[in-house]
Image: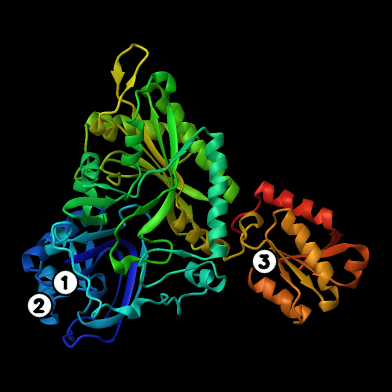
Amino acid sequence: MKVLQLDLESVEYESIKPESRIYEEDVDKSGRFKDVVMLLVSVERGDTTEIAAEAMKDAVAFATKQKSESILIYPFAHLSTDLESPELSLKIIKSMREYESLIKMHYAPFGWNKKLKLEIKGHPLAEQSRSYGKSVSENISKEPKRLDRKTMDRSIVRKSDWSGLPETDHRSIGEKLNLYSAQEISPGMVYWHSKGYTIYRELVKFLREKYEAYDYAEISTPSMANLALWDVSGHYGHYKENMFIVDDEGSGMGLKPMNCPSTIMIYKTKKWSYRELPFRTVIFDRLYRKELSGVLGGLTRVQEFSQDDGHIFAADEQLDAELETVIRFIKEVYSVLGFKYSPKLSTKNSQNYIGDDELWADATKRLANALEKNGMEYEVMEGDASFYGPKIDFYVIDAAGKGWQCATMQLDYQLPRRFGITYTGEDGEEHTPAMIHRAVLGSLERFIGVFVEMTQGRFPLWLSPEQIRVISISENYAEYARSVHRSLKEAHIRAVLDVSDRTLDYKIREAQMEKVPYSVIIGKREEETQSVTIRDRTGRQEKMGISELVAKLNLEISARAGGPA
């Protein structure tokens, strides 16, 4: 059984038409609920009412913890490709509805195509993928499927269909501006087109400059490691369902969902003195986290991604200063980007944690103190921490007022102990360092998706894939336009030349539709005076010399001015 568990502000659905040969007629065809835990359920072959009861037990515990008064059971066939028959699926769904609990149960009809609108609460555990029954054991233990070219579905070698989405959605904007695409052959993974990858690279360039200024060492580690690594770190026991596991001739290997264990392996390659701490690292490697197919969504929910993943190994007496510096780092970056954000402090989940309670309490107190010393108000999210340490998540507020978790920092006393890493203190004795996990933008894919929606494609000059369009009024001035374009390119400005025979109005309109920050118009006067007329997005025009134009653009680019409007 596959279950997607959602903690919702509100949900509204309406049944449109039956989509299964077995469907319910005697159940309300529409519903609207607030403050509800919603279970999207796919019943798989071999599932039983006992498995359904296990799923409901977890759902009730979660709803109780979140102080939700009701649960909505929503049949949803799109989480699995190994579905049980409609008859048995309905029987198991009905058993879930009859689960005895003080929580009120609502349920959507089985077998119908439904129109759905929902608003998810903004905390880290608001969306959780769960597997029960045979889905749990089908990881590395099952016999790998043998590919049969005769039955291989080649129809999936195509672009994913993003049509019908709102024009303000980052997928619609990305397709219109030729930034990125999704392909059916790589679910939950981004195909970066040249323009979109320019944004990606410029963000990484900006971050690398900041990391160098803050004395971080950039590293890289393999994408795959033996499961022994993930067992020592605790990920295999606490995070296995979200890992991609490969059976390599009987030796289990896992694609890395996180960078921290492999970063620790680099720390372990030498003996450390207190004089060498803190040791700060950053890594931009690809990570892989398995998601149910029904929850993938453009850039904001993916299975392959990269983040500016930093780790700091520090002595106890260095921790408070390091934590305050990380928050200052985050504030500086988000100030440049023009983002509003809200920090949330996540505390220990008593059902899923490792380590000593006293160390957890100390780590939580230190994080709270770091926020307070930076003058930041914050919300406490009880029980939302990762299994190895409390954390602060910074939620970026988008144009619709929704919060997206981007920056994060965690104080971890557990992994250093599990891996047995040490340093020699001033007293000559061996001590265990603490570890700070932190990311400023978090997933670059998610951040860019949010940024595209917040700017609606009107990127600041320094992040714009095309910074200026050089437009000739007619072919008579094409040669001068080419020389202006050449000057801009030599100054490392991302310029595009348009000397086509289309009308001037058409060419200007095309540049506006493609959200190009500036256009320069080249005509008779400009050629005679060896100047240009520059036009910005608002339509404001100004005449200036070529060297003045280059200086103006370079000043704006180097200042990294601008952000979401």
Query: Helix, strand or loop at disc 3?
Result: loop
User: Please, what is the three-letter code of the amino acid marked with disc 2?
Assistant: Leu
Q: Residues within 10 Å of mark 1 (few under 14, many from 20)?
A: many
Q: CA distance from mark 3 to mark 2?
A: 56 Å
Which residue is at a point 38% across and 55% down the rendered structure image? Answer: 122
**Please, what secondary structure does the residue beneath circle 2 have?**
helix
In the rendered structure, the answer to whether residue 445 lies left or right of residue 428 reads right
Among numbered discs 1 and 3, the one appearing first in the sequence: 1
Of labels 2 and 1, earlier in sequence is 1
- 198 left or right of 499 in image: left
Q: Is residue 543 left or right of residue 123?
A: right
Q: Position of residue 96 (x, y in %)?
A: 13, 68
Q: In the image, what residue occupies the spot 24% across and 83% down?
A: 112
Q: Quadrant of residue 277?
A: top left
Q: Where residue 310 sits in the image (x, y, percent)?
A: 43, 40
Q: Residues within 10 Å of mark 3 (few under 14, many from 20)?
A: many
Identity, as a three-letter code, of the amino acid under mark 3: Val
Q: Is residue 88 above or below residue 336?
A: below
Give the residue pinned by disc 1: 43
* Residue bearing mark 3: 516
Query: Percent position (x, y) of residue 327?
Result: 48, 37
Q: Is residue 383 above or below residue 430?
A: below
